[in-house]
Amino acid sequence: MAAAGNHTTLSWKDSFFHALWPTWVLAGMVIIWSEVSHTPIVISSSYFDVEHYLEISKNGYSQPFLTAFFPGFPALLFLLQSNIIAASIVNYLIWVCSASLLLRHKLITSATSMMAAVVPSALFFYLPYSESLFYFAISLIAIGLKKDSDKWLITGIILASISRPTAAVILPALILARHLKGYSLQSAIKRTLPEILIAALTVVCVFTFQSLFTGSFTSFFTAQAGWGNGVHLASLPLHSFGGNLIFFYDSAAMLVGFISLAVIVHLFRSKHPVSSPHAFGLSALAITALLILFSRGGGIFSLNRFIFATAFFPLALEIFRAVQISKKSILVALAAAIALGPIFAAHVHIKSALMYLLTLGLITAYFWFLRQKSTTVRTGFAVMLIAIQAWFFVQYVLQGNWIA
């Protein structure tokens, strides 16, 4: 399967331009929208997880439930003297540099960089959340896979393992990516053993650090149970919070996870080796969706962050862009997605059914525009999505209602 890597290497100047231009358009729209709606542009310290990160940066793990959050981003906040404006700016710069690195190393094209930057979840790269740090870590791992460089891989794994508990998807994704590239399963596991050891040692260090405050080495697991995470069979229909709009956005993320799983099956059946970094991103999306499905008892809240606001997403987009799938397969996939409607409660009300069909339509349109060769057509669609981003920013973020 052809994946990214055949396009011309971009200069740093061009890389930064491709990573930055959606932000310029978004900033203009947000300013106009906020002026029209008389909504001040303020980054609040009371945004859900932000207050938890701030508490850790100021007072350590003062409450046991805070151990659900790993210390990577709070450490960055501490260095920035817990200034959330500075943290937002630094987060944005980290994200832009990460996207530029992926472009420079020919892991993504300008098309996938643009399409990954215009989903609403990209707003987390502008806020004092851990998304940018995790994005950077995954970018380093992807570069390490392409270069077959332990230095890049180990650095990325350590950074990811101190940043987010969701780093747990990295190891099985690495094994699956190497298997998709052509390694036997046994060889893929053996090749991944050093990364498994590094990740395990890093997590042990995180738990040890947390125990200095809580007095318990296992407080992380207690905290996760308190947040409703554990091994649970999903109860149907799936559920989230924040209203229908947020629920169906999380549903879109779950559907992308299912699509990733279907593409993995397709790649195994076609028996064509796949580029490791892109197979890594695709595998991580599928594993993330399955992990959420079987660890929250049917709750899919925040899934949009774990799917769309990671470097896994643009890496996987390269496979979605390049893999050859027949029109018949696409129609079968759409029929299967419609049949899955009841697990997303699409049957309970006509409004829910229409919202679900709209979600499927937007996902289909997104992938269709991603495959278009015309830059003008893709850019026009991207600008429409940036308008949706701007609406989300004003209606949710600036009013403190963002639920994820």
Image: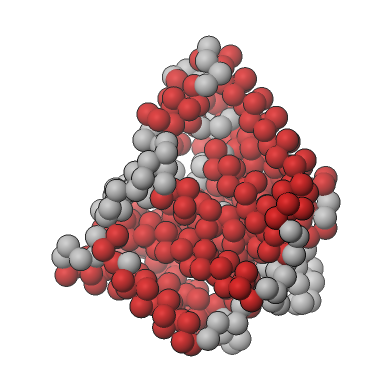
Q: State the residue in front, 201 or 74.
A: 201
Q: Is residue 107 visible?
A: no
Q: x, y percentage for residue 391?
A: 36, 62
Residue at image coords 16%, 70%: 350
**Residue at 51% in and 41% down:** 128
**Going by the image, does 386 lie left or right of 99?**
left
Count the numbered circles shown.
0
Q: Position of residue 175 (x, y in %)?
A: 68, 52
Vertical relation: 72 (above or below) 23: above
| Side of 371 relative to 191 (left or right) | left
**Left or right: where 321 falls relative to 222:** right
State left or right for residue 326 relative to residue 270. left
Q: Residue furthest top?
A: 215
Res 74 seen here: yes
- From the top left corner, tell me how far across and down residue 118 is, in percent: 50, 66
Residue shown at the point (46%, 63%) measured from the top left? 258
Q: Please say if 338 is above or below 221.
A: below
Task: Work out whether residue 43 or residue 133 is closer to the camera in this orientation and state it.
Answer: 133
Where residue 62 appears, x then y in whole percent? Answer: 47, 17
Look at the image and tell me in which quarter the N terminus lies. bottom right
* Residue drawn at 48 percent across, 82 percent down: 329
Q: Looking at the rendering, which quadrant does residue 385 occupy?
A: bottom left
Which color scheme is applied? secondary structure
